[in-house]
Every structure is written in structure tokens, then in C-alpha cells.
Amino acid sequence: MKKTICEQTPEHKSAALALLALSCGAFAIGVTEFTPMGLLPVLADGVHVSVPKAGGLVSAYAFGVMAGAPVITLFLARYPRKYALIGLMLLYAIGNLTSAMSATYSQLLVARVLTSLAHGAFFGLGAVEAASLVAPNRQASAVASMFMGLTVANIFGVPAATWLGDTLG
């Protein structure tokens, strides 16, 4: 008989909460990654550049993910994954706060790259951590649960954030 969440052991509840946290992290990163694409005219106006130049913010983020993921992941390999993931989300938060306070294109570009450094390493380390939280026959499902946050971000988070950004400017 299948146990309900209330009947599960504390270890099961702890794993479920950890997977929820990983999924929320994936959601937040997904919204940060994709929302600027729909807000290029607003971003360009806000930092006084052309829309094509504002597109460089998207490219810079992608470059930061590509270049930063292997380096950051290797650097964090010596630390417990839980603390590495928390550190990555702190870096992500600092990058987003810096983005929100940026007054110039250069400041926003640096802030986007800073934020992107957490992205690739979070997904790599997060997938390994998700798999380690469950029995071997549930590992693929656990990783899928984490990445569901990215799917939900693309379906609901990005359109909502784009609408909000367009509405508020």
C-alpha cells in the first residue's frame, strides 16, 4: 500500500522538501534566464541603448552559463553539495539584486553575467543532489522533479514576469 505524505518517514519528508527547494531554484533561474528576451525594448529604454545592443544581455548571460558552469562546478566539488547549492543561490540572488539596481548598460551586463555563473553549476550539482536523495529506482523521477521547476517557469513564470515588467517598466 502506498503511503501518503503524512504517513511517510521524516527522511521521506526531508527528501520531498529538498526536491521542492531544488525545483523552486530551477523555477527562479528559468524566469531569470528567459524573461529578458520578452523585455528587450523595455530593458533597452531603461539603460538607454538600442534593442539589438540590449540583446547582448541575453548573449552575455548565455556565455556566462557556458563558461562558468564547468569552472564553478569544479571549484565547488570539494564542498558538500547542499552548501554549494545554497552558495550558488546566494550568488544568484546577489546578481539579481545588482541587476535590479543597475542604472547603466555596463552595470546590467556585469550583473547578468554574475547571475549566470550560478545557473549551469546549480543544474549540474542540483541534478546530482536530487538523485542522491532517493532510492536508485527513483533517481530519474527525482531529477525530473527538479527540472519541472524550469518547465513551470517557461509556462507560467516567464509570461507573468514579462507582463509585469512590461506593465511596470
Image (spheres, rainbow, N blue to C red):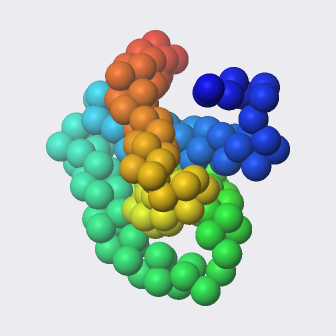
Q: Position of residue 109 (x, y in %)?
A: 40, 57
**Residue positioned 43% across, 64% down in the render:** 124
Front in this rendered view, residue 148 or 112: 148
**Camera-nearest residue between 148 and 162:** 148
Instruction: Report how many numbered discs are placed on residues in the image.
Output: 0
Q: Is residue 23 left or right of residue 119?
A: right
Q: Position of residue 152 (x, y in %)?
A: 42, 27
- Residue 37, by quadrant, is top left
Give the residue drawn at x 70%, y 68%.
Answer: 83
**Residue 11 seen anywhere in this rendered image of the structure:** yes
Pick whichever, 17 or 102, lies toward us.
17
Left or right: 110 in relation to 134: left
Residue placed furthest toward the right:
10
Q: Position of residue 86 (x, y in %)?
A: 68, 60
Residue name at image x 25 percent, y 55 percent = 59
In the picture provided, is 161 more to the left or to the right than 134?
A: left
Q: Nearer the viewer, residue 94 or 86?
A: 86
The residue located at (48%, 58%) in the rendering is: 136
Q: Is residue 43 above or below residue 58?
A: above
Residue 62: give x, y in percent of width and height.
29, 58
Does the image show residue 60? no
Q: Is residue 106 left or right of residue 87?
A: left
Quadrant location, the N terminus: top right
**The residue positioned farthest toward the left in the image shown:** 52
